[in-house]
Image (cartoon, helix red, strand yellow):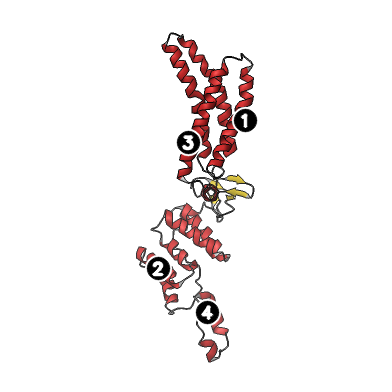
Amino acid sequence: MTPRLRNLLRQASRVAESGKRTAAEQLYREIIDEAPELPEAWVGLGTVLPTETEQREAFDKALGLDPNHEGAKRAIKILNGELVPEEQEAVVETEPVRSEAAVSQPSTLPTFPLPAAKPVDETKFEALAEDQPLVCYRHPDTETNLRCNRCNRPICVKCANRTSVGYRCPECLREIEAEYFNAKSSDYILASAVAFPLSLVAGYLITLFGGGFGFFFFFIVAAVGSGIGTLIARLTFRAIGRRRGRYMPRLIAGLIVAGGLLPALFFGLVALMFGGGFGGLTLLLMPGIYSFVAGSAAYYFLR
């Protein structure tokens, strides 16, 4: 067993001791996902599972991995009623005799003592402190003091996403975003059908009139481009029923850029073919500025 797994087992055991069985179950399952051949993890999981059937399956799995595991054998005996848990023995010795009615009441599931780890040569771990720092569940070699405030798993600075309610891990953040992003596949097709023609029209007009207003038209394009991009994004957003998609901002921004540059490319290539020289490619300058400004505005509107 690696020092890291021993550290995780200790963390799970401490959480179970504090009475947080659900959190302890999650930690044990994470250990099992990483090391399914570890009987100690299966025994620990069995001690915090809610039903006897699940407990027995976990203990049987541990015995399948190690038939001589004392913790698993003891837990099975407790389930079979052949053994009394240690924390109940003192109560049984001093408890007064109950009436037949009380004895006949159905008993609850037995409370298991925390599983004892297999004997290990502790000298190999003398350098390890009892309370080792947490390690990121996505980067096992990175120590951290942060936890996701939704699933309580340790996360490093690279994985931590700061939100208005605290730090979240990437998986929890993605689950929350999945509820927010409700666009269907057909919405992407409809959005493209709306945004691309509008972008082509705007790009054509910018290319057509871009050279006729002189140098100051650059400032006009920079000022108006943001409004055009926002307008295209707003019309597209309404067309798809105000549903949001994870990739919708990038799609619409890309279509606006493409629609803004394609007319200029077409006229530039025509000028080049008919002897206009490479000067015709300067037509790309004005639409390029427009495409950047309008695409950025649409992207931030749809985020």
Query: How many residues crowd around disc 1 within 10 Å: few (fewer than 14), some, or many (20 or more)?
Result: some
Check whether the beta carbons of the residues at disc 4 and disc 2 lie within 8 A of each other. no
Q: Secondary structure at mark 3?
A: helix
Q: Amino acid at mark 3?
A: Ala
Q: Is residue 260 above or below residue 148?
A: above
Check whether the beta carbons of the residues at disc 3 and disc 2 lie within 8 A of each other. no
Viewer can see residue 99: yes
The number of discs equals 4
Q: In front: 173, or 197? A: 197
Q: Earlier in the sequence, mark 4 or mark 3?
A: 4
Query: How many residues crowd around disc 2 within 10 Å: few (fewer than 14), some, or many (20 or more)?
Result: some
The residue labelled by disc 2 is 57
Q: Secondary structure at mark 2?
A: helix
Instruction: Give the spatial CA distance, label 4 vs label 3.
Output: 74 Å
The residue labelled by disc 1 is 227
Residue 29 drawn at (x, y percent): 46, 59
Q: In front: 34, or 5? A: 34
The residue labelled by disc 4 is 89
Q: Secondary structure at mark 4?
A: helix
